Image: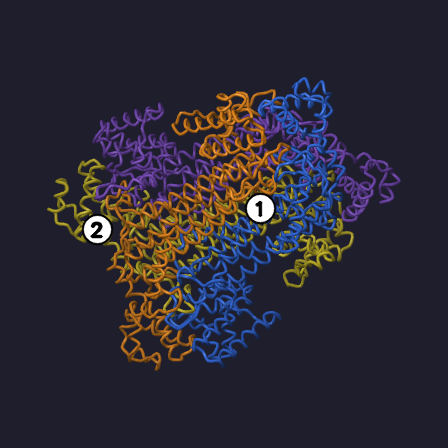
Chain colours: A yellow, B blue, C orange, D purple
């Protein structure tokens, strides 16, 4: 069967290759980094005597004009010029002639693109850290707002022990703190300049890579030119870090989706953050949470994409690496959007305290407190655990909570139980009784909240 | 802007939420399927007496006008209307009033989008199968062109046995045949209409899902309305099939990249399919092959993205599923582009027969033939294997090939070796001696080539 | 220990290399397939005159003895012999001498292992299909047991429309039906014999691959010897199919975990299928469901593992491929275990009909029914949707359901509403009113149940 | 068998459930960490007055005896006791009675297992860092051994520029340095004690988590008890780091496999690190390199496995998390084995200097040097690039290298070329001319080698 494109193909072969190999459809995002990098490179060339001061001036002026045109939407990128780098260089040459032709002295696209991507990643890290911080702030604000609210604590999606809502929200604050910490490490590793590695071997020209590194805000300069152009570890590490952020958000999303289910009804999401159904008029859906959860898959996919690309890739630069930006940009955009909307959603969410209070009565969440009470009376824990297990079974059979059992009933399970047992039963008593480090004890949670408020005010 | 589902809502959707939840930036690609599906749905509604014939006419005319505007680039999609479906419905209502307001009778976006995506996938399968077939044709043409060329056959990236190049190329033809077979199975499974499932439960209205299925070219209609709206197995299966295609192409790409390396120099890629270096003037790089190899990662990533999305997703429709199209479109586009360019690249590639002939002399590829010769003389295979191993070691120490050893030297390893041994040594003799089914025997390879030519002429 | 392939080697293999390259720690599972394949191969060799009948007899007897020893746990596998194939061959040679030394005539480990793995996969498919069928049976049995039970139907994890529990359970039956269908396709593609491809080129010896294929129950024989030894598509396809099974089970697991949460309390899992907590005496955790959900990740990981291995792998056999079995075995084991336990868990689960009935009153699930009622009175759907949206908002503000609104109240939203509206409101009325194909209409669900009972009785 | 948590249960656990939910088949590896953790916990309990000193003594003695039995292979783990933790506790109780029954006071398996896994990971990091360091040493030793050897430097798998082999090997040293750096960061984040978080809320008993943290060598103690038991970020981060190590090794493996191919013949792997073929007597296969490459897929799969498990997992502990150890152990084992064998393989490899020298003559690798020469004479780089491109095309047409062109021929491309041009052409001249930071300049490479020798001697 003759393909629609079959005839055209023999005439237009070059065009198909152009389309297949181009990256200008996605790498124009690097224009700022590219221009900044080119200016730093040109300044170094001038200092090294490789171009004249007048040439430097022409190059800088030309590049800034081009930047202006791009920002004004007036620059026409051409697919035939492959990528953002060659588009800008060609435009520069067309307006500066020989000066522009000298810009690529002692530079290859191999080190140029690596430098641009590193600068882009650095900014992406900084912006993501800011968004993480804001998300932490939103969680802390909400924790403060409901600082006395006791909620069921879950393990295995079953009632486990009563805890403060603030303690639950702070658990997410801790997760995001680790995300920030990981990104800070990632930033340190990625903020190394590859400029000056040229194609892969360095150059015989009298260049000064330290000075370009310095001018571009890099903390260090590459140690090995081959590694400098073939390394994309920083992209993979960044997307791995983004995957953890996305995973954390997916956990929050799932938990809140469950809490927003009618049967739980713990959570009241702001209408402005919900959507309706095209067919079912009653629906108020938490689509934002669902999308945060679903987009986690997108970030994971980006990570796999990158890892696959670099599996078994010989040194040094290979064109496969061009595709890294597709996954990188997608992962960063997805996580940034998810963080921004998560913060807003948290800030506008309300908790239904009555429903939550009712839920706290159910599920025998004070069973562990009773066991600890017995331990305090010298009963070995394993034995106490068994005693309480039987008490729970009896209570459950009656549809009762432990505190609803009479003292006689309770003592039928163990003689060690006394009247004071009622002081440890019930959600409120349980929470008030916690005292261990890092626990849901009200005073400790309040202190931790304050600590975070201080830290986040400073960030 | 008031949402079509906004009845129960008092607040407007937050602008950030609109941006985060919109899909119109990528699902406009479904406009043809959406309009075709809506027309079929309207026709069914008319037959069921749920809309009047005049209303049907207004709807159909309105939809076709909208389609025309979209194709002319004159239709303005609005992010506030979320997706392609609501954009088209809103435009229809604005021009047809109540007729348009009736189109969504007995339909939800849940079944609507599922139907659209299935139609899109069906077309994607058909187009991919055509591209696979063309790629097979290109491989067969190249095999015919070099039908007598013997190349080293590799295992472990080392010379193993001499084979016909045609036999190697036909190995890829077999792979792509399996890809076509898998896609045909996938098409059968996906070509089932979900239209009529409505939100998830079906409807009390007198609809006729069989008739819409029929009108839209579906082979069958859904059996269970909940499954119909929550099932995206077909998307995952399709992208899994695409992953295997991408994997096959990555194997070809890697093999050819190695063959194009200067040290091999087996392959001469058309200059029109190569690119140069921005810094190294001598480079002729096989970027197309590298990108085919690298893009494999992208398709794998899309698969992981989809699998992750559906992990642990409760029934029935959840908004997470909206993201499926991002991965689906990307995987299909990537594989289609890779197939198209692979076919063209194969057609324009030339093999360097002299270099290949020289390579065939090296590597003792006739060692197995010598072992088989000994087996023919009654030497147990394991013993023959040992004898030949020692002969190879001796030859290698001299920098010689087996056929360069004298008869006396050869007989020093086994008395069973006679003068006729030289008739089985050397690449040419080896290849000519093959006779087993499916082997690289020239007659069998020629027959298989002919078989494929016939089949591919019919496809 | 001297390796069977050691002829050309002067040095012994390094001990660390032996450990690193061995596969005998996991591929002993293939012993049955290996022995069966070797017997078929030996019979072919005898028919081809390549070994004597007495040698055939010795080989067969030796292999059967070895099989007996393996099954009795008396066979000692040696890491220095790398894999199950060489272990068995070495044992055979040690007891049959030259007869054993002839077994590897016209065979390589490359085609041998491919044949063994294909036979193993075939059995794995058959067993998995049986388990899927049994899981379907369990779901159908449970659906029959609760055939009249109405449950809330969910979209976006919110109440959408009332449906029969049987309809929900049948949605999973449909999913598993597709899994069976996919596995049947996979089986057809994998049941092709690679035996006779030898190392990669075929052989000059007068072998008969069709006869070994036939003897081993393969439907067809390989077409291309290079493809035969380098193809593991069937492993990847099988594990992709397994990933979909695991995904389906993870959806069921998540849904049931939510239904088992105290706030839902729809589901009563048998105590024998739950576990407790080491510290919290009251806990009754659905660990089985959690592990089914979590193990989904394991299967996905296996798929990624396999896809990565084959990315960019040149033809033909490469040692990387040895690792395919680790992922294959793990994925198949995981899915088989999950299916077996899911069936048992479904069979022993009870639904809490009172709690479910209470839930069905909430959530305005009859809103769509009211909209359809209005459509039946000529109100355009989009308008009806808006009317009902407002009615729901009013009812919700009063904490009421739609049927609890007075006729006057209802008519305040639309004059088209009459007394008969109460006949469509409420979960029971809704479900009874469904009539469309594939919907949750009681008669249709009953018919589909019967259809599945018949089909599953025959499977 | 009665479970330690069985108090509230009336039924025994189903046998199939026991098999499905057990982890003792893989988590016995944690026995050392578990016992060490239990002793620290018991000591804290004693200090807090929750157990008597005699009980502490009994517990410690019992645990050490159990440890001895496990190490002697005399301890019988029981599947019915689920995991390593309950097996050890049950054994302790059976020998110490009430003392043992008190060990689980103020501890849950949730914090216990988290602590054990963290200790295990910490040791895994340390061991992996040592192996990375040794691998760096092997690379540096080999670089020193061939310190003057010039090899073709590749980009796009084509000759790019001549470089020192030492420079190539140092590129891998830099990669592994980043791996070490990442693992150090990971270690810092993971070395935080979760002990004392109990089930998820902390406890009312007077525990002292700081003291157990200190006793077990943790740098810090958890801040939030919910986070402490639900967090497995450290496992994912560790396996992500392992994925990068595996990726780096796969790049080295692929490069060396290509270099070992007969057509390259740059590399001579030690026979003890190669294997043969069961059918082809001449084969000397680099199976170790292939397996290093292939096992990369295994590690990636483990990462995907883990990421999938935690997608959308609600707080706090869920049983899904049990599976994390399967992926964790597999990834760490795989990378450790790969690193150990890679170091040994590097140390025993030899480079074929003659073949490499021959290769350095081909491929016009001095083209960039010629362009830089022209730049030095004031020709704008883009123009120089064009001039040299034409010269290369001319030379290639003659089958000549640039230095084989006469001065007249060279000057026909540019008047700027003078007699001194021959001083920059040819691989040796090129390499000697490099002078930029991080380049392959002999003096700089030597300095970097020395720097690494010093650092690695100290590590």
Whether label 1 touches label 2, CB < 8 Å: no
Up the image or down, C80 lies above or below D418; here it is above
Q: CA distance from mark 1 to mark 2?
A: 59 Å
Task: Please tell me which residue lies in front, B359 or D415.
Answer: B359
Q: Is residue D453 left or right of residue B320?
A: right
Q: Is residue A350 visible?
A: yes
- Estimate the x, y position of residue C118 in percent, counting from the top left: 50, 40
Does residue D245 appear anywhere in the picture? Answer: no
Residue with the mark numbered 1: B247
| Lateral position of residue A417 relative to residue B418, left or right | left
Q: Is residue A277 left or right of residue B349?
A: left
The image quadrant of residue A66 is: bottom right
Classify 10 Å Cα crowding around label 2: few (below 14), some (14-19), many (20 and above). Answer: many
Q: The numbered mark 1 sits on a residue in which chain?
A: B
What secondary structure is found at the residue carrying circle 2?
loop
Q: Residue B420, image x and y in percent?
A: 71, 25
State the residue in front, D93 or A7: A7
How far from the left and from the top, in percent, is residue C53? 53, 27
Mark linked to residue A426: 2
Please tell me whether mark 1 or mark 2 is closer to you in this view: 1
Residue D369's place in the image compared with C75, above or below, is: below
Q: Badge 1: few (under 14), some or many (20 or more) residues near its Cα, within 10 Å?
A: many
Residue A118 place in picture, x, y as percent? 59, 47
Q: Residue furthest left?
A: A408
Which residue is more in the foreground, A43 or A254?
A254
Front-lying residue, D459 or D347: D347
């Amino acid at each position: 069967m003759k393909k629609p494109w079959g005839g055209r193909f023999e005439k237009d072969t070059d065009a198909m290759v152009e389309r297949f190999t181009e990256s200008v459809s996605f790498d124009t995002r690097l224009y700022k980094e590219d221009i900044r990098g080119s200016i730093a490179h040109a300044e170094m060339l001038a200092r090294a005597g490789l171009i004249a001061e007048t040439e430097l001036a022409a190059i800088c002026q030309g590049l800034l004009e081009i930047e202006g045109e791009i920002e004004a939407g007036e620059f026409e990128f051409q697919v035939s010029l492959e990528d953002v780098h060659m588009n800008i260089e060609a435009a520069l040459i067309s307006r500066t002639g020989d000066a522009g032709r000298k810009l690529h002295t002692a530079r290859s696209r191999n080190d140029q693109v690596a430098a641009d991507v590193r600068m882009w990643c650095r900014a992406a890290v900084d912006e993501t850290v800011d968004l993480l911080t804001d998300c932490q702030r939103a969680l802390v604000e909400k924790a403060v707002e409901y600082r006395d609210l006791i909620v069921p604590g879950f393990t295995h999606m079953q009632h486990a022990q009563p805890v403060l809502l603030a303690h639950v929200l702070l658990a997410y604050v801790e997760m995001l703190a680790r995300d920030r910490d990981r990104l800070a490490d990632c930033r340190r590793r990625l903020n190394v300049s590859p400029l000056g590695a040229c194609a892969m071997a360095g150059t015989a020209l009298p260049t000064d890579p330290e000075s370009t590194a310095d001018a571009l805000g890099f903390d260090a300069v590459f140690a090995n030119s081959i590694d400098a152009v073939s390394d994309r570890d920083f992209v993979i590490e960044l997307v791995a870090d983004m995957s953890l952020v996305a995973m954390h958000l997916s956990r929050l999303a799932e938990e809140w989706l469950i809490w927003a289910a009618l049967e739980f009804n713990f959570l009241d999401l702001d209408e402005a953050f919900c959507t309706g159904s095209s067919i079912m008029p009653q629906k108020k859906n938490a689509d934002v949470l669902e999308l945060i959860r679903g987009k986690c898959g997108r970030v994971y996919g980006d990570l796999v994409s990158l890892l696959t690309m670099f599996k078994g890739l010989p040194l040094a630069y290979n064109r496969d690496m061009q595709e890294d930006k597709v996954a990188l940009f997608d992962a960063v955009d997805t996580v940034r959007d998810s963080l921004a909307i998560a913060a807003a959603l948290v800030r506008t969410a309300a908790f239904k305290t009555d429903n939550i209070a009712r839920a706290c009565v159910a599920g025998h969440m004070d069973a562990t407190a009773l066991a600890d009470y017995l331990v305090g009376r010298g009963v070995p824990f394993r034995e106490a655990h068994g005693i309480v297990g039987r008490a729970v079974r009896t209570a459950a059979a009656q549809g009762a909570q432990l505190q609803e059992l009479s003292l006689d009933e309770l003592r039928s399970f163990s003689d060690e139980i006394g009247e004071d047992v009622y002081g440890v039963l019930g959600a409120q008593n349980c929470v008030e009784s916690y005292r261990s480090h890092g626990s849901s004890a009200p005073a400790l949670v309040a202190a931790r909240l304050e600590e975070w408020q201080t830290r986040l005010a400073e960030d």
